[in-house]
Image (tube, rainbow, N blue to C red):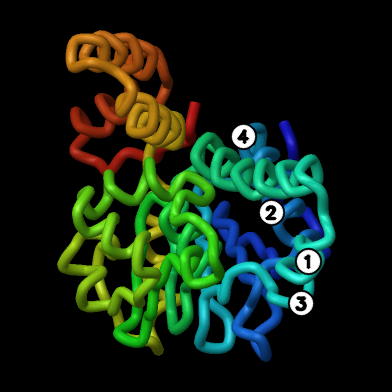
């Protein structure tokens, strides 16, 4: 399997500790915008994580007090004005492929959001499984503010599932900022933490997940995303099959043996 612990990123920060990959964009002086290169490399990295047994969970963190300011105005938006329809579609499909890769990577992703989290940055947070925020987090889906539609990178499909159709409609039509308090009340953010503790809280949560049954986590993530397009009957049958597969893992047996011995199970992901 792919060894991602030794991966050296070119267009963002990447480090791995105890099976937890920490990703941060690295242009704090501009509030960490995305570029053509960072989009493409992030897409490729999350695709590779499917095959990386050495990565158990991912934290997508903030840098310099901000998460991500979206697509870089000079490096992305300006050049897009010179592309033909084929080139534009190639770009929009690439950005959507990042979300697809995050959803299908098989690893729990925790977004640790501080400060600005807008445009494609808000999409990255949305595509994560769990979101922590500081009180200073400012989240906005800005696409209509630059003359585009709110339907970008899966926003119209995913955001309503998290916060509801009405609230998602307001944010996507207006492009206004959602405060951290609103985000927590609406269920976008799982909880608000002190800025000084954001990284530690995210790593602690990721470590808790990494110590769990990783094959089971992969199956949970898979079913959480697949079951939106299933009927209740199909979902129940799919979960029956998924759980039967998990019952053949060694982690299932380890949990039973640990229970009998009154010990904490040491999961290994097989």
Q: From this viewpoint, is residue 103 visible? A: yes
Q: Mark 2 or 1 closer to N-term?
A: 1
258 left or right of 245?
Answer: left
Q: Viewer-nearest of labels 2 and 3? A: 3
Q: Quadrant of residue 236?
A: top left
Q: Viewer-nearest of labels 4 and 3? A: 3
| SS under mark 1 | loop
Labelled pair 1, 4 in contact (Cβ < 8 Å):
no
Q: CA distance from mark 2 to mark 4?
A: 13 Å
- Residue at 45% in and 76% down: 199
Percent of width and height locating residue 226: 38, 25
Q: Mark 2 or 4 closer to N-term?
A: 2
Labelled pair 2, 1 in contact (Cβ < 8 Å):
yes
Q: Mark 1 or 3 closer to N-term?
A: 1
Count of labels in the image: 4
Q: Quadrant of the N terminus?
A: top right
Q: Which residue is mark 3?
A: 74
Q: Which residue is mark 2?
A: 42
Q: Quadrant of residue 63?
A: bottom right
Percent of width and height locating residue 188: 28, 61
- Residue at 29% in and 30% down: 255
| SS under mark 2 | helix
Compared to 216, does 28 lie above or below?
below
- Residue at 35% in and 68% down: 174
Marking on residue 11: 1
Q: Quadrant of residue 247?
A: top left
Marking on residue 50: 4
Percent of width and height locating residue 27: 70, 81
Compared to 85, does 9 lie above or below?
below
- Graded by Cα atoms within 10 Å as few (under 14), some (14 to 19) or many (20 or more), the crowding at tag 3 reads few
């Amino acid at each position: 399997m792919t060894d991602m612990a030794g991966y050296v990123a070119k267009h963002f920060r990447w480090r791995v500790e105890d099976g937890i990959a920490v990703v941060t964009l690295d242009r704090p002086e501009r509030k960490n915008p995305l570029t053509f290169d960072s989009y493409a490399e992030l897409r490729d990295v999350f695709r590779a994580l499917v095959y990386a047994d050495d990565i158990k969970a991912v934290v997508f963190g903030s840098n310099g007090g901000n998460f991500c300011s979206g697509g870089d105005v000079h490096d992305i938006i300006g050049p897009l004005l010179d592309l033909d329809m084929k080139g534009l579609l190639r770009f929009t499909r690439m950005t959507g492929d990042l979300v697809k890769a995050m959803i299908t990577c098989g690893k729990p992703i925790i977004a640790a959001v501080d400060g600005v989290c807008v445009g494609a940055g808000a999409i990255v947070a949305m595509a994560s499984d769990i979101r922590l925020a500081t009180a200073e987090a400012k989240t906005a889906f800005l696409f209509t503010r630059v003359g585009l539609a709110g339907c970008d990178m899966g926003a119209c499909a995913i955001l309503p599932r998290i916060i509801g159709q009405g609230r998602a409609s307001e944010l996507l039509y207006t492009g206004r900022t959602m405060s951290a308090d609103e985000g927590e009340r609406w269920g976008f953010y799982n909880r608000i933490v002190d800025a000084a503790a954001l990284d530690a809280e995210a790593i602690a949560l990721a470590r808790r997940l990494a110590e769990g049954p990783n094959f089971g986590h992969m199956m949970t993530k898979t079913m959480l995303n697949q079951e939106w397009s299933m009927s209740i009957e199909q979902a129940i049958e799919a979960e029956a099959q998924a759980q039967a597969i998990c019952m053949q893992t060694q982690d299932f047996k380890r949990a039973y043996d640990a229970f009998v011995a009154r010990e904490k199970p040491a999961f290994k992901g097989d």
